[in-house]
Image (tube, rainbow, N blue to C red):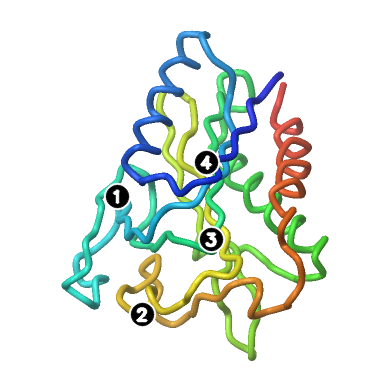
Amino acid sequence: MKIEIKKSKKPIKYRYAVNFLEKRLQKISNNKSKELIWFLTHPSTYTAGTSYNQNEIIDSSIKIIKTNRGGKITWHGPGQIICYLVINLNNRKKDIRKFLNTIEKTIIQTLREYKIKSYSDPKNIGIWVKQNKKSKKIAAIGIRIKKWITYHGFSLNINNSLDPYEKIVPCGIKNKGVTNLTSIKKQNYANIEKTIIKNLIKNLKILTF
């Protein structure tokens, strides 16, 4: 099963990206296009998923883009990798939880190759690390499924500023923090997308009938 791998070098505006994903989903539904793994970055952007609450906005001056992905409020911007997935579960196992587990497993395996221990939390979606004895989020996950085709995906913090998170309650979680890879371990993450692809393709094969 062939999957198109797409990487955008310049930052992509959020609404453009979502529109692109929705069009690709429709093409896949009509058997006119391949599945998609798309790596990109967004300009500094706050997005609010379908379950966000207004009281999770600390700084009322920020602009929020409401979106149809699952989850709450998060920030996207420079220094962060976005991985969008348009994957047809009609050709795989129609199991949303297993698909989310595939994303979680992929991120954990990828970070392990960089000698960073991370974990998932059944109560708080995303991938977490321990830093200074405190749980901090390193990757946020938010997906939507239409016609059993997934879209949206996950973000992974590499060397982004953590200041924007001070203006929101990230993912609606008050008692945990947010971090990035370079603050955990200073090393070269330039090829991390290749490691993600390797692990993701391997894990998606497990979902295939």
Residue shown at 29% from the left, 49% from the top: 50
**Counting residues from the N terminus, which is met first, the one under dot 3 or under dot 1?**
1
For the N terminus, the image quarter is top right
Q: Is residue 65 left or right of residue 171?
A: left
Q: Is residue 8 above or below residue 208?
A: below
Sequence-earlier tag: 4 or 1: 1
Residue 181 image point, x, y percent: 65, 71
Q: CA distance from mark 3 to mark 1?
A: 22 Å
Q: Nearer the viewer, residue 151 or 125?
A: 151
Q: In x, y percent, where is residue 23?
A: 39, 23
The residue labelled by disc 1 is 50
**Is 102 placed left or right of 60 in the picture?**
right
Q: Which residue is mark 3?
A: 80
C-alpha gap between disc 4 and disc 1? 18 Å
Which mark's residue is nearer the viewer, 3 or 4? 3
Quarter-wise, where is residue 48 in the image? Answer: bottom left
Name of the residue lying farthest toward the bottom? 132
